[in-house]
Image (tube, grey):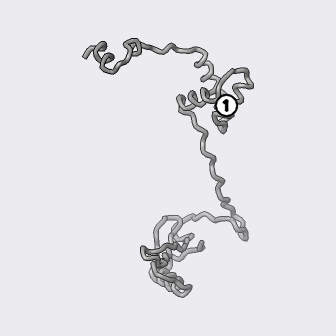
Amino acid sequence: MSERRACQVLQQPRSTQRYAPREDDEEARLIACMLEIVREHPRYGYRMVTAVLRQQGWRVNRKRVYRLWVQEGLKVPQKQRKRRRLGTSQHGCSRRRSEHMNDVWAWDFIFDRTENGRPIKWLSIVDEYTRECLALEVDRRMTSEDVLDVLRDLFVIRGTNLPVFFR
């Protein structure tokens, strides 16, 4: 189909099909300046970059900076979470990293409810070094005697391979 016929069907002027946007060197300079600010201050978002650009003498609109921000694919990086300390103090309360198999076993309870609303409880015991699940017990209710029974069974099965620490 010819361009003339297609434009006539769509009721659109033919000149819109031949339009080629001109490259704006001012916009290229603005993008370069934005990228420089982002390199210096990676935690700045587009609003803060707009403020810095205005301080530098640019007459820019926040919406224009946002459009260029998205066009360049810029993002503010996620903040890194603080890591828990892994100390070596013998009597400290900091976390001790597992160094070999059967060094540290972690145990935890997981709670949930069934479809009819009744509670259900899991006891999971994991070797932290190998990430092996040593025990996974499920019951409606679990007492300390039940936990001790599971640990006793693990000690019998493992024999001499007992943990040094529990978490």
Name the quarter where the N terminus is drawn.
top left
As shown in the figure, which amino acid type bears the numbered disc 1? Answer: Val
Picture coordinates of residue 70 (x, y %)?
54, 32
Q: Quadrant of residue 163?
A: bottom right
User: In this rendering, is residue 5 above or below 52?
Assistant: above
Q: Quadrant of residue 30?
A: top right
Residue at 42%, 73% in the rendered image: 115
Residue at the right extreme, as displayed: 55
Picture coordinates of residue 92 (x, y %)?
72, 68
Residue at 56%, 15% in the rendered image: 24
SS class, disc 1 = helix
Q: How many marks?
A: 1
Picture coordinates of residue 138 (x, y %)?
45, 78
Mark 1 surroundings within 10 Å by alpha-carbon count, few (fewer than 14), some (14 through 19), many (20 or more): many
In the image, taking residue 98 as reference, residue 138 lies left or right, namely left
> 34 or 51, which lies in front?
51
Name the quarter where the C terminus is drawn.
bottom right
> 20 or 143, which lies in front?
20
> 35 or 95, which lies in front?
35
Residue at 61%, 28% in the rendered image: 65
User: In this rendering, is residue 162 above or below 17?
Assistant: below
Which residue was labeled with disc 1?
49
Q: Quadrant of residue 53?
A: top right
Residue at 63%, 46% in the rendered image: 79
Residue at the bottom extreme, as displayed: 145
Picture coordinates of residue 2 (x, y %)?
27, 14
